[in-house]
Image (spheres, grey):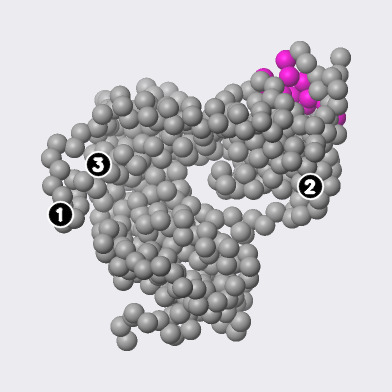
Amino acid sequence: MVEDKRDLLVLGGGPAGVAASIRARQLGAKVLLVEKDDIGGVCMNRGCVPTKCLMEVAWLRWWLKTKTEMGLTVRDVEMDWERLMARKEETVRFLRMGTESVLKSNGVEVIRGKGLFSSPEEVVVGERRFAARRFIVACGARWDEEPFGSSFSGRIVNTDWLLNMTEVPDSVTVLGSGPVELEAAQYLRFLGSEVTILEPSSRIMPLEDREMARRMSSILKEQGVEIIVGATPMNVEEDGEGLTISYETKTGPKEVSCSFLLHARRRPALEDLALDKAGLGKTDKAIHLDPYLATTLSHIFFAGDGAGGPFYSHRATAMGILAAENALGARRAFQSERVPRTYYTFPQLASVGMTESQAKERGYEVISVTIPYATNASAMIRLETEGALKIVSERRYGEVLGVHILGANATELISEALLAMELEATVEELAQVVRPHPSFSETLTEVAREVMGEAIYLLR
C-alpha cells in the first residue's frame, strides 16, 4: 500500500539532503527525508568534523614543539588519546543531535532505512512504500575500491582508519595530493610518522594554481613530508610487517617501503538506489544533470556528492538548497565556478575561480599579482608567514577572475573574494575597502592595489 503522496522525497541525510529538506519546508512543501545511517553524512560523522578535531590537536602539538621562537618553551607535549577521541566523538554527537533537532523543528519527516526506487514515482523503505511528486537524490559518496585489493593484513587504509588510530605508525605512503590526502599526510607527519606522498601528476594539487602548488610543496617538504611526483603506483607486496610499493616514473620503476598505504578516493554511491527502476538506467558513475540539477526525468534531481565531484560539504549544501528550489518551481542554474576549493592543511589553501593558466587559455589578457604572507603584520606576530595571496584579473576592466590564498585563515578569507566575485567587484573596488590592522585580510587590499601598480608597502 502506497502512503500519502509527499511533495518532495529526499534520499540521503547528509549536507545536501538536510539542506534540501529544510529549504523545501521553508517553501511550504510536505517533505520526507530517508536516511539509512546517521544524519549528517560523511562530513559530520566520518569526514570534515572529526578529522578537523584531530588535526587541530596534532598541529598544536607540532607547533609547540617547533615554534620555540614564539617565546614559549613547552616540554613533554604528549597526546592524551583517550581524551582526544572522547572530544571528537562528543563534538560529532552534539552536531548530529543539533541537526536532527533542526530537521524536526522545521517539520521534516525523517524515516530511517534504505530507500530504493520501485518506479519513477515511488520509493520503498523496508516494507513501506512512498510516493512523491518530486525527488532529490542526495546519496553522497562511498569509498572507492581499495587499490591493489584488500588482502594486505589491513595495511591498505583510508581516512576512516585515522579516526580511531591511537598509535602513531612508523611510516605511511599517501596516494595523491588532493585536500583529504594532504590533510591526512600532515596529520600523520605532525604526530611523528615518516610520510611519503605519491602523486601521478607532474606536481601536487594539479587542479590548483601552479604557483600556489609550488609554494605548498616547499612548505610540506620543510615539515618533513617526502613528495614524489610523476609516480604511478603499479604494485604492492607485503614485506614483513609492512608494504613495498612499486611505482613507475619517467626514469623507470622505483619502490618505497612503509607501514601503511593510505588512499582517499571516493565515488558517488549510486549502486544501491535501484535507479533503473526510476527510469534512469544502471550506472556506477556520476549521473548526467542539466544546469538546474535535474536528470533526464524532470521530477528527479540530484545534489551533493552523488552528483559527482568535487566532494565538498559546502558544495553539497548549496546544491541541496538549489535543487529544492528548482524542484518546487524555480529555474536557477548551479554556478559551479563559485564553489571555493579548500584544503584544511597548515597553512590552509583556498581558491575560487580560474587559475592564471586557465585564464590565459580562455583568451583573457591577464594581470596576476602575488604578495607573500611574510609582508603581513598579523602573520609576523603569529609566526605564520608561510604562503601568499594571489589575484588573477582581466586587464581591460579589472574583473576578478580568480583568487588563490595559501596561508593562515585562508578558508575564511576566501569568502570575501567569493562575495566580491558574486557582486562583480573590480580590483579597483577591492583596493578601496578599508580593512582592520593588523589583520590577514589587509593583504587582499594590498594585492588589489598592486594589480593597478599602486601597492603601498612593497619595495620598489
Tell me residue 208's x, y (percent).
48, 59
Quarter placement of the N terminus = top right
First in sequence: mark 1 vs mark 2: 1
Give the mark toward the camera: 1 or 2. 1
- Residue 46: within the magenta? no
**Image marks 1 and 2: residues in contact by CB distance under 8 Å:** no
Q: Secondary structure at mark 1?
A: loop
- Residue 114: within the magenta? yes
First in sequence: mark 1 vs mark 3: 3
**Image marks 2 and 3: residues in contact by CB distance under 8 Å:** no
Q: Secondary structure at mark 3?
A: helix
Tell me residue 220's x, y (percent).
31, 53
Residue at the image point whose x is 53% and y is 64% from the top: 417
The residue beneath circle 3 is 61
The residue beneath circle 2 is 326
Q: Secondary structure at mark 2?
A: helix
Q: Mark 2 packing: few (<14 Cα in 10 Å), some, or many (20+)?
A: some
**Residue segment shown in magenta:** 113-126
Tell me residue 405's x, y (percent).
44, 62
- Say which of 165 and 441 sits in front: 441
Residue at the image point whose x is 53% and y is 80% from the top: 428
Give the quarter of the image for residue 332: bottom right
Q: Amino acid at mark 3?
A: Arg
- Can residue 337 be seen here? The reply is yes
The residue beneath circle 1 is 71
- Relative to residue 425, is residue 228 drawn left or right? left
Q: Is residue 411 above or below residue 283?
A: below
**Looking at the magenta stretch, what is its main secondary structure?**
strand
Q: Is residue 446 above or below residue 90?
A: below
Q: Amino acid at mark 1?
A: Gly
First in sequence: mark 2 vs mark 3: 3
